C-alpha cells in the first residue's frame, strides 16, 4: 500500500509509476475521488458524533437535577425534548458511521489494486526490456573440448538423479523426482545456502507453506499474480509460491523497536505455482515446474536503509553463484515485468549451455514500505511509530540451480564435476555414472 499522503500531495508520481508499469493510470483518479469521499464521510460522522457528545453533556446535569427535584415540570419538559433530539441524533450517528465505514471499505479495496511506486531508475518496458548490469564468467566452448553438451534431463537420467516420467505418472506434467545424487545435490545446495546466510547474520526459519488470505494479500500475491496461486477452497488457505509470504507475515500487526533492525531471516520451503499462462513454455525438464524447494532471504529494515540493503542482498546472491562457478549475468528488471510489490528488482540469470541463453535463477526485490503498510508492520524510533521497509532475495531456487550445475559442469561421459564449494556438503568431487 502507498502512503495516502502521496496520493494527495503528488498524484502525478503515482500516475507516472502506473504508466511505467503499463497499468491503469485512471486508477489514481478513482483513488482520489474515493479518498475524498472517505474523508468527507468520516468528517460528517465526526461532526454528528460531536453533536451527540455535546447533547449528552447537556442532558446529564438536567437528569441529575430531576432526580433531586422530580416535580420540576420545566426541567422534565426540557429533558424530554433533549432525549427526543438524542434519539434522532443516535439514528443519524449510526447512519453516518455506516456510511463512513462503507466509504472506507470501498477506498481500501481500490487501494489494493494499486501497485508499488517503481524506482524511476528501473528501465521502462516489458519482459525483454531489462538492462544488463554485468556479465560474470565465460561460457564453456564445448566444441573446443570435442563434445556436444547434454541437457539436464539427459544428464539427470544418466546419473539416476532426475525422474520426470514417474513423476508424471504420479502427479502429472511439470513435476519431477530428485533421486540418488539428485536428492543429495539439493541437500548439499541447501546446506551451502544456509551456511552462507547464517554467516551473514540471517536467522534460519522453516516456515508454514499454507497461509491465510491476509498473508497472501498483504504481500501482493492476490493481485496480478493470483492466477499462479494454489488455493485450498475448503479451508480458505493458500499454498505459497515463495517463503517470502510467511516470512513477511511473521511480524504482521506488530510494532518492532528500531534498535532491532535490520531483522534478517532465511527461509527454506517448498513452493507451489500453477504456472498459468505458460502453456508450451519449458515443457521439457525442471526449469518451470509446479512444485520446488527454495532458500529465500527476507529483511525488515528502516526505509532509509532499504536501498543499501537491496545492494547487500544482491551481493550475497552473487557470492552464492560465484561459489557454484557458473557463468551468469545481473539484470535490472524492467518496470512492466515487476511484481506488484516491487519498486525495483535485480535478477541473476545463469548461462544454460544447451539453450544458448541465460535463465533466471535468483532475484532480489526492494518492496519499500508497500508490504509493511498492508500487513500493519511498523517500527518505533523514540516517540515516532512508522512503517518499516521489507526486501526479499532468492538465494537458491533448487531446480534451476541444479540445471545450471549439471549443464555447466558436465564432462564428456555424462559425469558432472562438483563445484569446490559444494564438495564438503556432497562428500564427492564428481557425480559419477552408476
Image: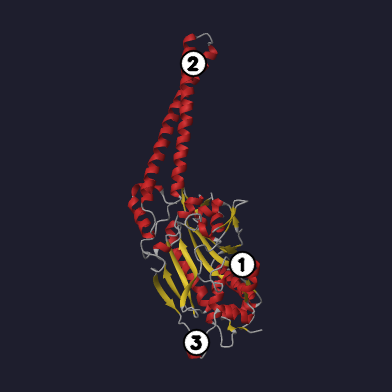
Q: Where is residue 40 in the image (x, y as percent from the top left)?
A: 39, 37
Q: Name the residue under label 1.
A: 172
Is disc 3 in contact with disc 1, using a CB cutoff of under 8 Å?
A: no
**Residue at 46% over, 26% down:** 52
Comparing 185 with 300, the one in front is: 185
Position of 184 with respect to 404 (left or right) is right
Earlier in the chain: of badge 3 and badge 1, it is 3
Earlier in the chain: of badge 2 and badge 3, it is 2
Q: Name the residue under label 3.
A: 142
Q: Quadrant of residue 168?
A: bottom right
Q: Position of residue 360 (x, y in %)?
A: 48, 71
Count neighbours of disc 1 (C-alpha within 10 A) and say few if under 14, some if 14 to 19, many if 20 or more: few
**Residue at 34% over, 56% down:** 16
For numbered disc 3, what is the local secondary structure?
Answer: helix
Count neighbours of disc 3 (C-alpha within 10 A) and say few if under 14, some if 14 to 19, many if 20 or more: some
- Please identify the quadrant where the C terminus is shown: bottom right
Q: Position of residue 143 (x, y in %)?
A: 48, 89
Closer to the eye: label 3 or 1: 1
Q: Mark 2 points at which residue?
A: 80
202 is higher (above) or lower (below) than 422: above
289 is higher (above) or lower (below) than 408: above
Q: Is residue 36 visible?
A: yes
Q: How far apart are marks 2 and 3 (CA)?
A: 97 Å
Count neighbours of disc 2 (C-alpha within 10 A) and say few if under 14, some if 14 to 19, many if 20 or more: some
Q: In the drawing, what numbered circle is on residue 237? A: none
Amino acid at each position: 500500500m502507498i502512503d495516502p499522503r502521496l496520493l494527495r500531495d503528488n498524484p502525478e508520481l503515482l500516475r507516472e509509476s502506473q504508466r511505467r508499469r503499463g497499468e491503469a493510470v485512471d486508477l489514481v483518479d478513482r483513488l482520489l475521488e474515493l479518498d475524498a469521499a472517505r474523508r468527507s464521510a468520516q468528517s460528517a460522522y465526526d461532526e454528528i458524533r460531536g453533536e451527540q457528545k455535546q447533547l449528552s453533556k447537556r442532558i446529564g446535569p438536567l437528569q441529575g437535577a430531576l432526580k433531586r427535584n422530580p416535580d420540576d415540570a420545566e426541567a422534565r419538559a426540557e429533558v424530554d425534548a433533549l432525549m427526543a433530539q438524542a434519539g434522532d441524533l443516535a439514528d443519524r450517528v449510526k447512519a453516518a458511521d455506516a456510511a463512513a465505514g462503507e466509504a472506507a471499505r470501498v477506498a481500501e479495496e481500490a487501494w489494493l489494486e494499486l501497485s508499488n511506486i517503481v524506482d524511476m531508475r528501473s528501465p521502462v518496458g516489458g519482459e525483454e526490456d531489462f538492462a544488463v548490469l554485468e556479465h560474470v564468467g565465460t561460457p564453456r566452448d564445448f566444441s573446443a573440448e570435442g563434445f556436444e553438451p547434454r541437457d539436464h534431463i539427459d544428464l539427470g537420467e544418466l546419473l539416476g538423479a532426475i525422474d520426470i516420467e514417474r513423476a508424471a505418472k504420479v502427479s502429472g506434467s511439470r513435476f519431477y523426482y530428485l533421486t540418488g545424487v539428485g536428492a543429495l545435490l539439493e541437500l548439499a545446495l541447501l546446506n551451502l545456502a544456509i551456511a552462507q546466510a547464517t554467516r551473514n547474520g540471517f536467522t534460519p526459519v522453516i516456515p508454514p507453506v499454507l497461509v491465510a488470505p491476509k498473508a497472501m494479500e498483504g504481500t501482493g500475491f492476490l493481485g496480478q499474480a493470483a492466477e499462479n496461486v494454489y488455493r485450498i477452497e475448503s479451508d480458505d488457505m493458500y499454498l505459497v509460491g515463495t517463503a517470502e509470504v510467511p516470512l513477511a507475515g511473521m511480524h504482521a500487526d506488530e510494532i518492532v523497536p528500531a534498535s532491532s533492525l535490520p531483522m534478517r531471516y532465511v527461509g527454506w520451503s517448498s513452493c507451489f505455482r500453477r504456472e498459468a499462462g505458460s502453456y508450451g513454455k519449458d515443457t521439457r525438464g525442471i526449469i518451470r515446474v509446479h512444485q520446488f524447494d527454495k532458500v529465500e532471504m527476507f529483511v525488515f529494515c528502516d526505509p532509509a536503509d532499504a536501498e543499501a540493503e537491496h545492494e547487500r542482498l544482491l551481493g550475497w546472491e552473487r557470492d552464492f553463484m560465484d561459489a557454484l562457478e557458473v557463468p551468469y549475468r545481473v539484470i535490472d528488471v524492467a518496470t512492466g515485468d515487476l511484481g506488484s510489490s516491487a519498486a525495483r528488482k535485480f535478477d541473476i540469470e545463469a548461462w544454460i549451455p544447451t539453450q544458448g541463453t541465460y535463465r533466471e535463477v535468483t532475484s532480489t526485490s526492494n518492496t519499500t514500505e508497500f508490504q509493511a503498510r498492508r500487513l500493519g508492520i511498523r517500527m518505533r524510533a523514540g516517540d515516532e511509530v512508522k512503517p518499516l521497509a521489507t526486501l526479499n532475495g532468492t538465494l537458491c531456487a533448487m531446480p534451476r540451480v541444479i540445471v545450471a550445475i549439471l549443464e555447466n559442469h558436465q564432462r564428456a561421459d555424462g559425469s558432472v564435476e562438483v563445484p569446490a564449494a559444494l564438495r564438503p556438503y556432497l562428500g564427492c568431487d564428481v557425480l559419477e555414472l552408476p
